[in-house]
Image (spheres, rainbow, N blue to C red):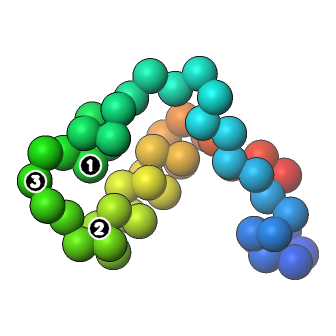
Amino acid sequence: MAKGGLKNMTVNFKGREETLEDVFGSKPLPVTQMTKKIWALIKKYNLLKK
């Protein structure tokens, strides 16, 4: 990880066409699982920039 942690990083979702239901599904979900799914999406599409 870069020096200073995540404060020097940005995540750009511009141009993404997924809806929240596409990412999280239609059933209720704990916050911890939501966080895991968001990070999986960020990693899958390489959305984290320094």
Q: Which mark is residue 33?
A: 2
Q: Residue furthest left?
A: 27
Left or right of 37 in this view: 15: right
Q: Is residue 27 left or right of residue 2?
A: left
Camera-side mark, 3 or 2: 3
How far apart are the alpha carbons under marks 2 and 1?
9 Å
Instruction: Note whether 21 is above or below 50 in the view shown.
Output: above
Q: Pick whichever of labels 2 and 1 is earlier in the sequence.
A: 1
Q: Amino acid at mark 2?
A: Gln
Residues tagged 3 and 2 counted as in contact (Cβ below 8 A): no
Element class at badge 1: helix
Residue 6 figure quarter: bottom right
The answer to whether marks 2 and 1 mark residues whose Cβ atoms lie closer than 8 Å is no
Residue 42 drawn above or below residue 14: below
Dot 3 corresponds to which residue? 27
Q: Secondary structure at mark 3?
A: loop
At 59% from the left edge and 21% from the top edge, which residue is drawn?
15
For image coordinates 36% across by 55% down, the residue present is 37
Name the kind of residue labelled 3 in the image.
Lys
Q: Earlier in the sequence, mark 3 or mark 2?
A: 3
Tell me the element at label 2: helix
Residue under circle 1?
A: 24
Q: Nearer the viewer, residue 2 or 35?
A: 35
**Residue 1 x, y percent position in the rendering:** 76, 70
Residue at 48% across, 57% down: 39
Q: Nearer the viewer, residue 42 or 14?
A: 14
CA distance separating discs 3 and 1 = 8 Å
Question: In the rendering, at what x and y percent does residue 9 appear?
Answer: 79, 58
